[in-house]
Image (spheres, grey):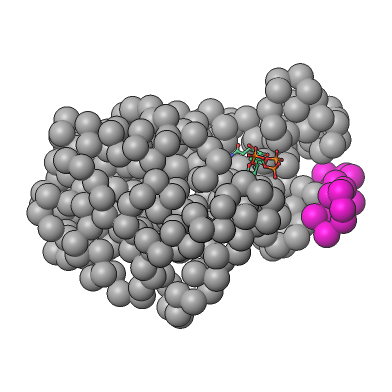
Amino acid sequence: MAIANVGIIGSGAMGLGITHVCAQAGCNVVTVKATPGSWEKAKATLDRNLGKLVERGKMEAADKEAILGRVTFSTDERAVADCDLVIESVIEDLETKKDLFRRLESICRPNALLTTNTSTLSVTAMMAVCKQRDRVAGLHFFNPAPVMKLVEIIHAFETSDDTIQSLDAFCRHIGKDPVLVQDTTGFIVNRLLTPYMLNAIRMLERGTGTIESIDQAMKLGAAHPMGPFQLADYIGLDVVEAMAHNIFADVRHEHHAPPHTLTRLVQLGYLGMKTGKGFYDWSQKPAVQNPQLVRPVV
Ligand code: CAA
């Protein structure tokens, strides 16, 4: 099935990034703000993100306008009724997502594909609340969605081959390189990346190195664009902690349990770049390691 009209539910960093990618590839996109309030701020954020690319000579001003012209914002989920594909990117809460899938099933056309951008929740659990399950799958993008080439296509228990083929063609059409993954907690990337970041935090707690030395080591020694602490701050420490909880709940292996320092930072509201402080103090230019973490938080 050719996918020309895409519905995105959720207008946070991921929802807007996916909106950008799909509209840039020529799809008509309906982006629904899932939480109360107007969509004006989401539209302004997309406009600003595209504007930065124009300022830096990465995009023509006319292309920016064409992209914005293909996006319709709404606060009404029913606006996705005519979409060929819906990608939900709302809060990482299974009950919220299950309720959304129940509603989408009655809103969308019978041949529309219904997908989730969850990082660590069960796609099969979302599928289970649907009557027509063959069209349900995961479509997991990475942050920043306009830059990261990978999309994990998640095959849940009753996803049909036709659905997988359509999603594979769609990902290639929007310029991504998809990999097919069976529905297991954390899929491929987060199942490997989450314990990696958690082990870096435990390494800090043991005093093996500092935030900066561990990051420097992984950037220069493993050719990662960001070290584990910079990456955790970039993803958001609340998100990293939630991923750890979800994987630990399934695997029950101590490697996946959130370390003390992570839990304390989240409790204190230090969530990384989005709050200005996490493992680093991002108000400084360049960012410096959070002075409160020179000694482990105990
Ligand atoms: N939108 C569009 N383009 C963007 C962008 C954005 N939000 N952010 C950066 N870019 C572009 C820039 O325009 C630039 O383009 P050119 O190469 O054409 O010049 C390029 O990306 C590099 O950007 P910068 O020079 O500004 O900065 P950088 O070189 O430090 O790269 C980065 C920034 C792309 C974020 C890079 O540091 C990186 O790849 N970091 C790792 C990101 C990562 O691992 N993400 C996965 C997180 S895990 C996840 O998402 C899963 C989950 O479920 C939680």
| Residue 96 screen position, x and y as percent | 35, 62
Quadrant of the image containing the N terminus: top left
Q: Is residue 253 left or right of residue 163?
A: right
* Residue 282, picture quadrant: bottom right
Which residues, given as a range, are shown in magenta? 281-298
Q: With respect to residue 19, does 41 lie above or below? A: below
Q: Is residue 66 left or right of residue 137?
A: right
Q: Is residue 31 left or right of residue 281?
A: left
Pick the front one: 75 or 231? 75
| Residue 195 screen position, x and y as percent | 59, 32
Please name the residue shown 30% across and 54% down the image.
Answer: 6
The quadrant of the picture showing ligand 1 is top right
What secondary structure is the stretch in magenta mostly built from? loop
Q: Is any part of residue 34 visible from this angle?
A: no
* Residue 226, picture quadrant: top right
Please name the residue shown 53% across and 38% down the image.
Answer: 148
Q: Is residue 295 magenta?
A: yes
Q: Is residue 209 magenta?
A: no
Pick the front one: 222 or 171? 171
Please name the residue shown 20% across and 42% down the image.
Answer: 2
